[in-house]
Amino acid sequence: MAKNDLDALSIEELAALRENATDKLMEKVAARRAELEAELEKLSQYDRLAKKSQAAPVAKAKKIDEKANDEVKAERVAKAA
């Protein structure tokens, strides 16, 4: 990129340079925003999947069930004896 001698530019040239730089910056920001939004959309599918899996948790054995199983086993042992 060529360097400009800003001191050598007229006010009109400096104003045009500023306007061009602002326009280019806005274009680059808009393009980057679109890239990030597309990436966010791709990642949001994983968030939806995670929420679905949390909605239907896997049933775990409760301690009460374990105690009941122990009682049943104890009754069987007592009957067998």
Image (cartoon, grey):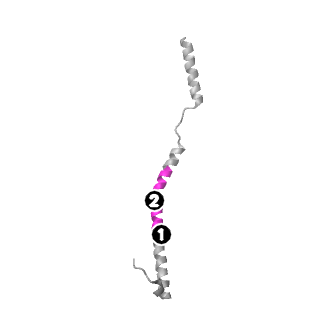
| Image location (x, y in percent) of residue 16 | 47, 83
Which region shows up in magenta?
Answer: 29-48
Q: Secondary structure at mark 2?
A: helix
20 up-or-down from 11: above or below: above
> The disc labelled 1 sits on which kind of residue?
Ala
The amino acid sitting under disc 2 is Glu
Residue 43: x %, y % from top left:
47, 55
Q: Residue at x 47, y 77 (%)?
A: 21
Residue 49, given in percent of the width and then of the height, sits at 48, 49
User: Within 10 Å of the Cα at label 1, are there few (<14), some (14-19), or many (20+) other Cα atoms?
Assistant: few
Give 34 or 5, whichever is nearer the viewer.
Answer: 5
In which image quadrant can residue 3 be found? bottom left
Quadrant of the drawing holding the C terminus? top right
Q: Nearest the camera: 33 or 18?
A: 18
Q: What residue appears at the point 45 percent right and 71 percent down from the top-left corner?
A: 28
Q: Tag 1 or tag 2, which sits nearer the N-term?
A: 1
User: How many tags in the picture?
Assistant: 2
Residue 39: numbered disc: 2
Q: Is residue 52 above or below residue 73?
A: below
| Residue designated by label 1 | 30
Give the residue displayed 50% in from the left and 51% down from the top.
48
Circle number at residue 60: none
Q: Quarter holding the N terminus?
A: bottom left
